[in-house]
Structure formats: structure tokens, C-alpha cells
Amino acid sequence: MRALTEAGNDVVALYWSKTGNWFQVPADIEANEFADGLPRSAEPVTIQVGEQGGFYRSGKRGKLTQIEISAVVVCCHGGPGEDGSLQALFDLAGIRYTGPSQAGAAVGMDKLAFSGTMEAAGISSLPLHLITTDLELDEQGPLIVKPRFGGSSIGIEIVDDLPTAKALASSQPLLRNGAVVQRYLDDAIDLNISVRTYPEKSLSAIERPLRPEEDGIYSYADKYLTGSQGMASAPRELPAELPADIEGQLRTMASQVVDLAMVRSVARIDFLWNSAGLWVNEINTIPGSLSWYFWSYEGVPFAQLLAEMIHEATLSPGATFRTDGADGTALRDVGAISHKLA
């Protein structure tokens, strides 16, 4: 909000609360005002779907006034803001927005679907398995257990064997909507790259996140709680020092992922690398900090990155759902319902 305002834009700041309600807040609000929940300065607004879809504020005598918005910059990292739920709502309301489409968001958030898409396309990725009571694996531990739907390393655990993984999946609340498991590579190096699709498909420099400890996963705390700017201030090697062939392979794979995963706007693709190979790990379709630090390194200021994301969004239709076949022909030909039930 601050970057767009300082660049001369008239910004409408919308807050989607934990209760699912919508509010408008001042564009110069500080982050710490959200620490205890709803800021005192928040004013309720509503969202409507359909022909008159959009955001509305209530005026005198309850009269609703539509809020003029060219496009919504979606900054929801994780949860229903990144899994396709919010995107579907905006599609139904005819609101243009940055980031992935509903389908792209859903594929990106579902680790099993994303892994299966990579496998079907022949792109190297570590085998991923849905944890069920009858799952059997030939692989020995350690294993890494992850929520099937989720991000930011929340709910991820390293276990010694499959029985422990199954017990964790049945008892951990963060895994109640599904859990996946794969072999844990304790010697693997994390490598990340950002991609953007406007004004043309572009790949950033590659980063190597630096964990405070040599062993273990790159945790939520490592990503977001180690500096004043969250992910943007986490320790990293950028650009990563890599053999030329590994860098070339990673860039080729990342370019393929853009098309396969329906990437739009700005995303981050995460890889794992060791002496045995290079694998696509997962994608963040709305990455923390919108991956702006990647593009700042490339000479793209944050305000420019946002402006180009908004311009891309304004070029897209405001509603993408289809109504083919809903012309009434089938209903006219169906006959009386009572005959169908006889």
C-alpha cells in the first residue's frame, strides 16, 4: 500500500479479516495495528457477486456505494487467499486481480496435484505420496511429512519412519485436510527462483536461502521471523553460486513450470539440489513479500513491479466462469419431473 501510494496511486486498502468479513483501512496504516486483530480505524465494506459485483461501502440510510477499483493486488500468502477460494470469489464478482487464476492457485496449493503435474510432464520431482492407512513405501526414513494444502513450512515435520508419519497425520490438526510424505534429503540445498509473466515471461536470479542451522528444514521462523522485513530480510545468497549446468537446468525447469502450473503475475518456484540431482519441490503462487527482493536485485523497483502486476490484471477479463449450455434448451426438452420419478 505504501509503495503504491508513494508512486502516486489512489489506493483503496482492503482487509479480509479472520472472521471472513471485509473492511477498508487507511492506506497509511502500520502493520502493528493488525497485531491484536481488527484495527480501530477499520470501516466495514461488503462484496457482491453477479452483474453488479464489486466492493461496496454503506452510506447514509444504508445506501450502498460501489468502490471504484481497477484491480485488486492480492497479498494473501497461504490459506484461502492463495488456494483459489478468493480468486473464485473475485471471478464471480467480476473483479480483476493480480496473481494466479482460480485454477492456477488451486494447483499450486495442492502439493499432491502439483507434484503429479510435474511427474506427468516428465519434470524431475521427488515422489510424493498421500498418507492413507494402507500406504506402503519401499523408501527408508527419515521422511518429511507436509500438509497437502498449505505453505510457509507450517505443519511440516521430519519423522524416522512411515508408522510415525501415519500417526502424525491422524493426530496433527494442521494435517486434518490431508497429509503427504516423501523421502527427506538431509544433504539437499534449497534453491529458489522468482518468475513473472508481465510484461513478458521473465526469470530472476537464483537464491540460496541460508538457514541459521546446518541441519533441518527451512522453517517458518527462518523465513519470516529473522528480520524486520520478513522473507525479504531473511539471510540468503543471491545470486547463488552454482555450476553453470545446474543453473541452466533449473532455469529450463522453471520456465516449463510457468506454463504447466498456469503461473500468472509473480510467483516463486522452490527446488532441491544435491549430488544426485535437481528436483522441483513446490511453487508459491503468491509468495511472501511478493518476491520483490528478487526483482529489486534485477533493477525493478517495488512500485514498478506492482504497477506492472496491476496492468497485467487490468488486461484480463473480470469474470472467467463459463455459462455454455445454460440457454434453457435442456430444460425445455426434459419433460415433466413427475414422469422422471415414475
Image (cartoon, rainbow, N blue to C red):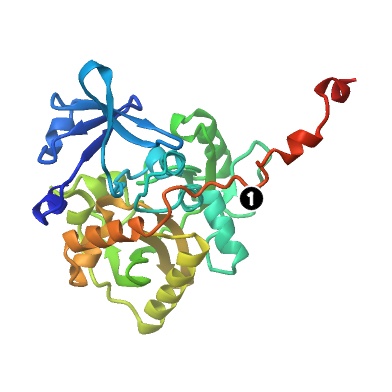
Q: Position of residue 230 (x, y in %)?
A: 20, 48
| 337 shown above or below 121 | above
Q: Is residue 29 left or right of residue 148?
A: left
Residue 237 visible in the displayed image: no
Please name the residue shown 27% across and 18% down the image.
62
User: Regarding mark 1 in the picture, which secondary structure is present there?
Assistant: loop
Residue 261 visible in the displayed image: yes
Q: Position of residue 310 (x, y in %)?
A: 28, 56
Q: Position of residue 81 (x, y in %)?
A: 38, 41
Please name the residue shown 21% across and 72% down the image.
298
Q: Position of residue 219 (x, y in %)?
A: 31, 47
Closer to us: 213 or 305: 305
Q: Amino acid at mark 1?
A: Leu
Q: Is residue 265 left or right of residue 11?
A: right
How many dots with numbers?
Answer: 1
Give the quarter of the figure containing the C terminus. top right
| 213 shown above or below 24 | below
Please name the residue shown 18% across and 27% down the image.
42
Disc 1 crowd rating (10 Å Cα; few below 14, some 14-19, many 20+) is few
Closer to us: 20 or 210: 20
The residue that mark 1 highlights is 137
Write down the quadrant of residue 41 in the picture.
top left
Residue that protrudes farthest toward the right in the picture: 342
Closer to us: 309 or 141: 309
